[in-house]
Image (tube, rainbow, N blue to C red):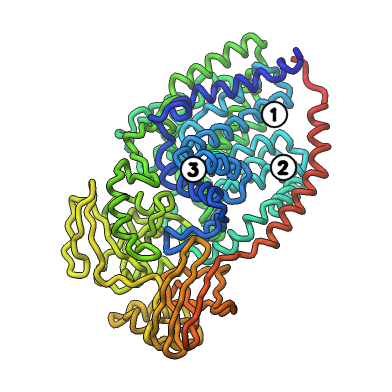
Amino acid sequence: MTRILSAAWPFAVLLAELLLFFRKALFTTKYVFPWDFRGYHLPLNEFLARSLREGTLPFWEPYTYCGFPQYANPQAQTFYPPALLFAWIGALRGESKMVSLLHWQAVLHVFLGGAFVYLLLRKRGAHQPAALLGASVFQLGGFFASHMQHLGLVNAVAWVPVAMFAIDSVAVVAFAIAMSFLAGFTPAMPVVAASIFVYGGIKRWPKLALASVWAVALSAVQLIPTLELLPLTRATNRYQEFGLDGGMLWQGFVTLVWPNFNYAFDLENFKLPHNVTFHYLFSSVTAMGLAIWSRDRRLWLCAALFAVILLGFHGPLIPFVYPLLPGSIRSVVYLEYFSFPFLLILAILAGIGAARLSRRAAAVSGTIAVTELMLVSSGLRFHALPKTDEPAVTIRAFEGSEETLVKLRIHTGKSLPPQRIDIQQDSMNWANSAPIMKMATPSGNDPLVLDRYQSVRLLYATPRHNQMRYLEPERLDSPIASMLNTGFLMTWTTRTIDHPQWPYVEDLPGHRLYRNSRVLPRFWMPGRVQRSASKEESLRLLADPGFDPVAAAIVEGSAIAAGGNARVLEYSAQEVKLTVEAPEDSFLASSEAFYPGWIAEVDGRETPILMTNGAFRGIAIPKGRHEVRMFFEPNLAAGLAITISAFALILWRAVPAILRTVRAPRPAR
């Protein structure tokens, strides 16, 4: 029993440190992890939890971008086991609990990383107090203190210490890399790979390459859908959108010893041109001193390499190397996130330095370092933003106003399915949080937006904040807005729209609502078909001033149209049922996004879905009255089979390896 307690107490200390450090978000309802945490990650995970609650598969999200393949977006964490566990708990507890659950999910991942940094240092010969110091500095240091808003990033990098600890086990390294990928934040993968390969050293690269291949197989259930999605998105051109300006400015390094150098304690005075979260590295002055005293030249070379990469285009290396990389690689490399391996190596060095001290001296040094981090970093707005500064969006209220959603649902709900709403100079939460509110919009704010869809939107909308993934309508007389079933337009109450097609409806708390007098239903039967040979031709025809979606559908395929009537009987995320009546052989057009995996049936017989009006689904309809069914059924069989097979191999190889590691002789304490 004494031996068990002796081995377990450091992990209890690490967990207690995190609970104290993140206490405001974990144990009160007044603070939240800020920004992207609720603006981007919460809607994805809320949709996952709701799907589990309703007994449906979380594959197709119908609320943003006129429909989006959620399962193919890795940031949705659809196939990430910890996310599924927390979503299942959220499904049992109710929608209002997901923010709290995601806080715990993020913090427990930090604990996972901290625990394995401790084990890694013990494996390298450090005594308990020294290993505990290094692990504490890692988990309370500048990276996690400033990046808790990025749930997928935190989840992904937490597995790196696992791989480092078991660096000679191909199976364990493969499992850790696969979990990093399934955690969802694709730009974390260059960081994860670089951390593991640099730490492992050149001699281990063949084994690490084998582990990487194995990891690909383990993550196939997510990787294959993502690879199918990527060529259809704008994500591969991200580097063109943001230019060649990545990396941390030199001022960030000053925060290693002067935490408020960039006004981390007073964000309103932050003056640098880049994101403030990329410029906070403080990991205690005591730890930095111990890292210098460690005298581990190899690890210091690793830290120096990561520091140079972290500087990005503001340093000596990346301006020459980065332009040589393929565009698809450049689009997923976020140089600023190399602060993670840089600070991880410094934490390990601090532990190694502390191991040169006596146990008592190391324990005192660890106490001082943790006290520094608690007093300086705990409670910063990076991970403890007052809720009053970021009003919540829930199923019942928009930014605190229940009246807004109640009245908006009355207006949009007069049809089946409800009409979509768009925004013009209003809160981006209408787009970000549409899945939470179950409020459909042609807008959205995801880097993986379908290229064809956004190209159609660009014919009448313009980017906001120079980001092509988020557009707001500009040409209000465009027939495309009506074609996308945009029934209402929302603005701040400080704005007034004077347009005959968009009459004023009413003021809602903080917002002004306008109605589209020419809105089309989600499904309709145009008078004729105009054939197109390509995406470019379709966009040209859509941009023609004479384009009328009621008169003609632009179809990339062979079809005819003669009008008719369509009525929606049932509409859900994965399935639509309609009745249609055509006087002659005709065509059913829709404003539902086209994507592989959608299947259409007319009277129970499968019929091809044709690319319609540049980005949407349409099908040929025979003369007469018919029952139409469209349902989403992506083919996951191959990816699932590969993942299961690779995991079975993991169990066969990894379990004995783990047992050998656990039973290995430990260094003297």
Q: Which residue is drawn at 28% across and 80% down?
A: 545
Q: Nearer the viewer, residue 390 or 206?
A: 390
> What residue did someone put label 1 on?
120
Q: Distance between the residues labelled 2 and 3?
A: 24 Å
Give the x, y percent position of residue 574: 53, 62
Give the x, y percent position of residue 510: 23, 47
Q: How crowded is mark 1: few (under 14 residues within 10 Å), some or many (20 or more)?
A: many
> What residue did someone put label 3 on?
336
Q: What element carries label 2?
A: helix
Q: Distance between the residues labelled 1 and 2?
A: 14 Å
Q: Nearer the viewer, residue 523 or 497?
A: 523
Q: Is residue 8 left or right of residue 387?
A: right
Q: Which of marks 2 and 3 is nearer the N terminus?
A: 2
Q: In this view, does 356 lie to the left or right of 536?
A: right
Regarding residue 33, the answer to whether it shows in the image is: yes
Picture layout, residue 82 above or below residue 598: above
Q: Residues within 10 Å of mark 3 (few under 14, many from 20)?
A: many
Q: Which amino acid does label 1 sit on?
A: Leu
Quarter of the image containing the N terminus?
top right
Q: Which residue is drawn at 46% across and 26% down?
A: 27
In this rendering, the label closer to the viewer, 2 or 3: 2
Q: Is mark 3 on a helix, strand or loop?
A: helix
Q: In this view, does 495 lie to the left or right of 347?
A: left
Q: Which residue is drawn at 76% across and 44% down?
A: 171
Q: Is mark 1 on a helix, strand or loop?
A: helix
Q: Which of 97 and 428 is in front in this view?
A: 97
> What residue did someone put label 2 on?
173
Q: Which of marks 1 and 2 is nearer the N terminus?
A: 1
